[in-house]
Image: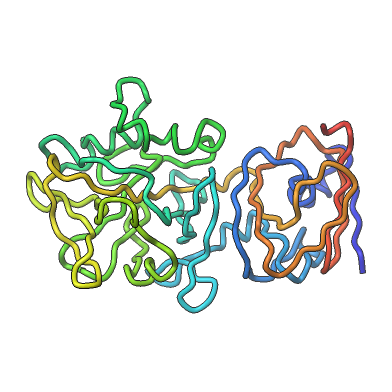
Amino acid sequence: MNKKYFIKGTEKKCKRLIRILVAIVLMVVSFVLPQPLQKVYAAGTVNAPSTGTFWTNDDLKGIAGIGDAPYYVSGTTFQKANYAGRTWFVIGNETVSGNDTLVLLSQLPIGTSKFDDSSSTYSTSYLVKGLNDSLDGLSTAQKTYNVNTIFGADAKAYVQPVTISGAANSYLYLPDGNSSDYSNFKVGSSNQFKIPINAWKSNGGSISGFPAYFWLRSSYNATKAYTFWPYAGSYIVDGRDVDSSTGSILPIFNLNLSSGLFASAAPVATSDTTSVVAANDTMNFRIIDATKIKSSATYDENSVRVIKSSEDS
């Protein structure tokens, strides 16, 4: 049976429903998740389409890794997300500075760099400055993988900075690992998620086309930093010279979920349209613009119909 809701004004009883319906047509920032997804519910009492068309903000906050492992949609399959034009693995939730965040690991490197000129101290390294400092004063090479280049101002606004290995205000940061564990690397601001290197590879993680190893945060000795690099058909952890080696950069970031963010498989509409949502459709994560509240939508378990008001143009 169809459920139809018209979003008008700022009535308190519609507040939670507005978060779901308005964002179907109003998007400031989006990233895309492929199916399959768990069945979720909208507004507490109304069933969303059974194909998993909606993920509410609360659902996003409930995505947890399994033990110390990343979030799996099934078996050993990582959930993927597109954000700011790049593909990321959804790892799990963590609270940072009182904010609920979602940890995301890049599927592919975002660039290459030396670690530093002379020191393996992560917090003051050339690489960390390139990742997170203002573009002013950075080298041409550093600017290519800087947070402002990778995200731009709009997408960066929803990235939660963390303090990681002594580096404060880190919007992007590196995985961690050392020679005590050759099979895994760790992500999250407290290293709480362990990523099996073989699972990362089997899910499409790759450094093909980049230097054949990626940097980790840990120091090997005063002038070498740890890296993951291929050996005998697999990967191992070993140290590389910080100044003479050019490694791949495989970053992590934390998406801040405190805004009106939720997921919908319904496409953005420019007019009165009906969209059939298939089980394998992608999921769009959206930020609500609360000033635009005239549009409406209807949905049932098979389709979503969006009616966009001209006042919201």
| Residue placed furthest toward the left | 222
- Identity of the residue drawn at 78% across and 67% down: 49
Quadrant that contains the C terminus: top right
Percent position (x, y) of residue 287?
Answer: 66, 43
- Identity of the residue drawn at 29% across and 43% down: 112
- Identity of the residue drawn at 90% across and 61% down: 3
Q: Who is closer to the viewer here, 265 or 159?
A: 265
Which image quadrant for residue 244? top left
Percent position (x, y) of residue 277?
Answer: 77, 63
Decide if residue 3 is on the left or right side of residue 45.
right
Q: Who is closer to the viewer here, 294 or 247?
A: 247
Name the image colouring. rainbow
Q: How many marks?
A: 0
Percent position (x, y) of residue 1?
Answer: 92, 69
- Identity of the residue drawn at 87% across and 43% down: 271
Percent position (x, y) of residue 211?
Answer: 26, 51
User: Where is 204 relative to 150, above or below?
Assistant: below
Decide if residue 156 is on the left or right side of residue 133.
right
| Residue placed furthest toward the front | 209
| Residue placed furthest toward the bottom | 75
Which image quadrant for residue 133? top left
User: Where is 310 relative to 259, above or below?
Assistant: above
